[in-house]
Image (cartoon, helix red, strand yellow):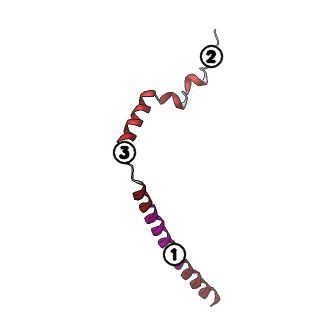
Amino acid sequence: MAKEQSPKISEVRPSRLSGLKLGRIGEIISELKKTRWPSRSEATRLTLLVLTIAGIIGIILGIIDMGFSRLFEIISEG
């Protein structure tokens, strides 16, 4: 009886890049060209808006945290 050879790893599991074909890259580039990118002023305005909202939420959560800290101090003293 002849010994059966196990298949090589490359035959069993193709590499990750083998699934990515050249045609797909062209499709990706064409889709990116269709995208409407924001202007510099719009990107700046939206970034400032996000930072402002994040700061406000941070302050609110900080105040709530301080309140709970004081509450637990009062409870633990009693």
Please, what secondary structure does the residue beneath circle 3 have?
Answer: loop
- The residue wearing badge 3 is 35
x%, y% of residue 18? 51, 27
Farthest residue toward the bottom? Answer: 78
Q: Amino acid at mark 3?
A: Thr
Which label lies toward us, 2 or 3? 3
Q: CA distance from mark 2 to mark 3?
A: 51 Å
- The residue wearing badge 2 is 5
Between 7 and 70, the one lying in front of the other is: 70
x%, y% of residue 68? 55, 80
Farthest residue toward the top? Answer: 1
Q: Is residue 15 magenta?
A: no
- The residue wearing badge 1 is 59
Q: Is residue 56 magenta?
A: yes
Q: CA distance from mark 3 to mark 1?
A: 36 Å
Please, what secondary structure does the residue beneath circle 1 have?
Answer: helix
Which label lies toward us, 1 or 2? 1
Q: Amino acid at mark 2?
A: Gln
Q: Earlier in the sequence, mark 1 or mark 2?
A: 2
- Bounds of the magenta span? 47-63
Between 40 and 37, the one lying in front of the other is: 40
